[in-house]
């Protein structure tokens, strides 16, 4: 039941995500008169607000529980959608957009992840894969639906309708069907009759103060910075997808439509990697994600029609699906469930900050050179560096050096 609620929460994060905003981008530029670089800068600042917000919200989830927090976040996110639909000046647009990014990109997904992580240990990878199908469904459905709504009723009305969707899906399901931890109901993680045997002790050294030392350790920063590559690169590519496709002679309709194969590949790779992570740990899956991201960057320069666009989107979606499972499980894998909100929230803030920066240099280089190719080529170094960072990071929690045992 909790995984199902997490699925709906993940799906409802879409209005604040890059893949939905990219569909609205050209309409917003035409309506407001802002340049593409200006909107990219606005996007970066708004996403920076998200990085700060997710750190606050994750700590609130540690204190009050993710169930209460996500209900509040969903109501606020719907309000941001409504604000986006009526914003008229630059300041109003910035405030609405910053709120939408802060609540949709970080605060909503982190609560879905934290809630699911509390209910599973040995089966955490598979549970995250099922919960993550909500992101894949959102990727597949919301961009074409948004395109249809924009063409039918306008971009402002489309955002208002997305706000209604968030209210309907998240608040009732979270209130009636979700609970913060299995212990709250007299149960144990994974549905077992006993507590988890190999769960990592709190904190990097098994102390009772899980937040001391962790956030300044080499392992935390090696992992956190390595995990920023995918948000940086994928956000840049998705944000400018319409422009990149237009440069290749491919229309905006195809740019929106290829989110469907992207989402299918994302869902399939998430499902498969959830099982693999439970058996091998997250490092091998992360290496695979970075190699596929490197291939996707190369394919983005070869797009010349719908078939090649589908291949590119599928490869990017596969890399994203693997990465999402890794980023969902790796912090609980290393540091356990106690104090997870602060640890994972801090890491997520770093990831969101990097995703905020992604679109800006790509837009600036396109403006300077007239092409996206240079920016895409420079980003190709990032997956290689990230693989090195993860491989040299030591497993800081001795109890968790080996994969969690699977039920027989």
Image: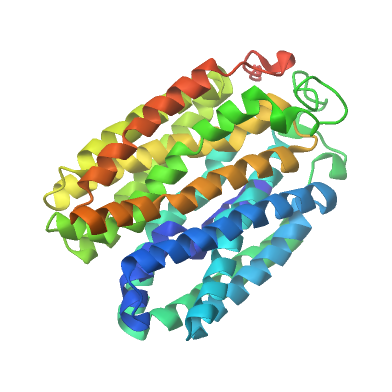
Q: Residue at x 75, y 55 (%)?
A: 67
**Residue 94: percent from left, percent from top:** 52, 73
Residue 5 seen anywhere in this rendered image of the structure: no
Q: Is residue 189 left or right of residue 245?
A: right
**Residue 17: percent from left, percent from top:** 48, 59
Q: Residue at x 36, y 57 (%)?
A: 239
How many labels, in total? 0
- Note whether 185 is above or below 272 in the view shown: below
Q: Residue at x 59, y 38 (%)?
A: 328
Q: Residue at x 78, y 27 (%)?
A: 203
Image color mode? rainbow
Residue 229 seen anywhere in this rendered image of the structure: yes
- In which image quadrant can residue 259 be found? bottom left
Q: Nearer the viewer, residue 373 or 137?
A: 373
- Note whether 282 is above or below 254 in the view shown: above
Q: Is residue 268 left or right of residue 312?
A: right
Q: Is residue 169 left or right of residue 159?
A: right
- Note whether 395 is above or below 142 in the view shown: above
């Amino acid at each position: 039941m909790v995984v199902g609620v997490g699925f709906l929460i993940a799906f409802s994060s879409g209005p604040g995500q890059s893949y939905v905003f990219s569909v609205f981008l050209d309409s917003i530029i035409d309506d407001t008169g802002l340049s593409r670089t200006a909107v990219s800068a606005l996007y970066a600042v708004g996403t920076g607000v998200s990085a700060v917000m997710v750190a606050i919200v994750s700590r609130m989830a540690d204190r009050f529980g993710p169930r209460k927090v996500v209900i509040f976040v969903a109501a606020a996110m719907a309000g941001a959608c409504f604000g986006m639909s009526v914003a008229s000046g630059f300041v109003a647009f910035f405030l609405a957009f910053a709120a939408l990014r802060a609540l949709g990109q970080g605060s909503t997904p982190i609560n879905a992840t934290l809630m699911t992580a509390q209910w599973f240990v040995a089966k955490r990878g598979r549970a995250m894969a099922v919960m993550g199908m909500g992101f894949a469904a959102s990727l597949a459905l919301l961009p074409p639906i948004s395109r249809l709504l924009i063409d039918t009723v306008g971009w402002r009305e489309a955002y208002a309708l997305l706000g209604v969707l968030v209210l309907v899906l998240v608040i009732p399901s979270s209130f009636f069907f979700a609970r913060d931890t299995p212990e709250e109901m007299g149960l144990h993680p994974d549905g077992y009759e006993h507590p988890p045997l190999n769960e990592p002790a709190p904190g990097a050294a098994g102390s009772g103060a899980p937040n001391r030392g962790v956030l300044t350790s080499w392992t935390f920063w090696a992992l956190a910075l390595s995990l920023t590559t995918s948000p940086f690169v994928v956000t840049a590519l998705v944000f400018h997808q319409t422009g990149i496709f237009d440069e290749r002679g491919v229309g905006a309709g195809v740019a929106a439509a290829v989110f469907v194969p992207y989402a299918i590949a994302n869902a399939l790779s998430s499902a498969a990697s959830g099982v693999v992570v439970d058996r091998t740990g997250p490092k091998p899956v992360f290496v695979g994600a970075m190699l596929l991201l490197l291939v996707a960057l190369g394919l983005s320069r070869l797009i010349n029609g719908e078939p090649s666009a589908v291949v590119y989107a599928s490869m990017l979606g596969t890399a994203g699906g693997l990465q999402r499972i890794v980023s969902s499980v790796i912090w609980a894998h290393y540091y356990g469930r106690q104090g997870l909100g602060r640890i994972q929230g801090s890491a997520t803030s770093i990831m969101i900050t990097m995703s905020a920066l992604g679109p800006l240099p790509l837009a600036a280089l396109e403006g300077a050179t007239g092409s996206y190719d240079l920016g895409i080529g420079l980003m190709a170094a990032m997956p290689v560096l990230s693989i090195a960072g993860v491989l040299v990071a030591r497993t800081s929690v001795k109890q968790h050096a080996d994969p969690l045992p699977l039920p027989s």
